[in-house]
Image (tube, rainbow, N blue to C red):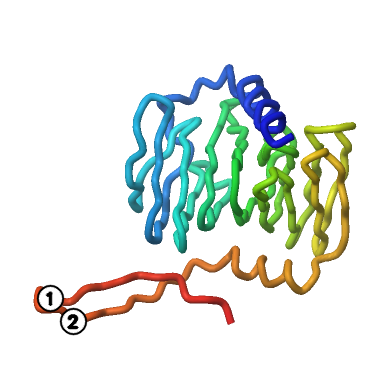
Amino acid sequence: MKNLNLIVFVFICAAFFGSSNLTDTPVAVIKKTVNKVMQKDSQKDWVTSKTGDILFDGMEVKTGYKSLAIIKFTDNSGVLTVRENCVANIYAAQKNKKMDKNTLIQQGTVHFDVNKQAPDEEFKFTTPTVVASIRGTSGYIEVEKDSSTNIICEKGLIQVEALMGKKEKGQVAAGGSLSVSAEGLIQKGEINSEQSYKLKKSRQSEVKTLKIKTPDGVLEIKYLPEEE
């Protein structure tokens, strides 16, 4: 089932973005990195990401253990916090002088804070099991190892369509949660205590620095503190 989900996922990506003409146009910028963050495009190998790096249409970003990347779109439409052990592609397509965005999350968690979109502008997230449309919304999307997807809506409204099974549709409003199984089944509910903790943690980006004196000088180690 997981392999089938990935095949569908890749097919949708190719169909949706095949006509993109922004290959040489910056679509986002990396505002912050913590620990191991890598990036690549389809023609190059992985390289280490740095604060200020520009991302172009289709570029892939991945984070390691206890790592994160904060990404801001160049049209100021939204900010993504890519959490640890996450793999995501940043896509954008020009449409009537506006930019349609679709972040493809292969695995891991991404917190999003998206500004209100124009009626003819799209800001979407795609996972192996669902497409989520975002408008003036914050929350997080988590892709599990079996490709199932969990969506938490902190504010605003999120509309979803499952990519598997009967391709069910649904929506989740502020204070709500929604999960889509690997088979495409949608379940909705209110944010529980565990999800509330994950939401708080998904926003976290402050870094602490540990300084250790060595014979060769002071060694600085940056790390993300654990949530209380």
Query: Residue most toward the top?
Result: 19
Q: Measuring 42% from the left and 31% from the top, which residue is drawn there? A: 41
| Front one among 8 and 50 | 8
Residue 193: horizontal and vertical position, in percent?
Answer: 76, 74
| Front one among 19 and 67 | 67
Q: Measuring 65% from the left and 20% from the top, which residue is drawn there? A: 15
Measured in 3D between alpha carbons, the distance from the residue under mark 2 to the one under mark 1, in whole angstroms, is 6 Å
Query: Can you say which quadrant of the picture contains the N terminus?
Result: top right
Q: Measuring 67% from the left and 56% from the top, which residue is drawn there? A: 140
Looking at the rendered structure, the secondary structure element under dot 1 is: strand
The amino acid at mark 1 is Gly
Is residue 84 depicted above or below 14 in this figure?
below
Q: Measuring 46% from the left and 34% from the top, which residue is drawn there? A: 59
Q: Is residue 201 left or right of residue 136?
A: left
Query: Can you say which quadrant of the picture contains the C terminus?
Result: bottom right
Q: Residues within 10 Å of mark 2 (few under 14, many from 20)?
A: few
Residue 106: horizontal and vertical position, in percent?
Answer: 60, 41
Q: Assess whether mark 1 and mark 2 are in contact (beta carbons under 8 angstroms).
A: yes
Q: Is residue 76 left or right of residue 212?
A: right
Q: Quadrant of residue 101?
A: top right
Q: Is residue 165 left or right of residue 17?
A: right
| Disc 2 target residue | 213
Residue 99: horizontal and vertical position, in percent?
Answer: 58, 33
Is residue 63 depicted above or below 18 in this figure?
below
Q: Quadrant of residue 213?
A: bottom left
The amino acid at mark 2 is Lys
Q: Quadrant of residue 111?
A: bottom right
| Disc 1 target residue | 217
Looking at the rendered structure, the secondary structure element under dot 2 is: strand
Is residue 183 depicted above or below 150 in this figure?
above
**What is the number of the mark on residue 227?**
none
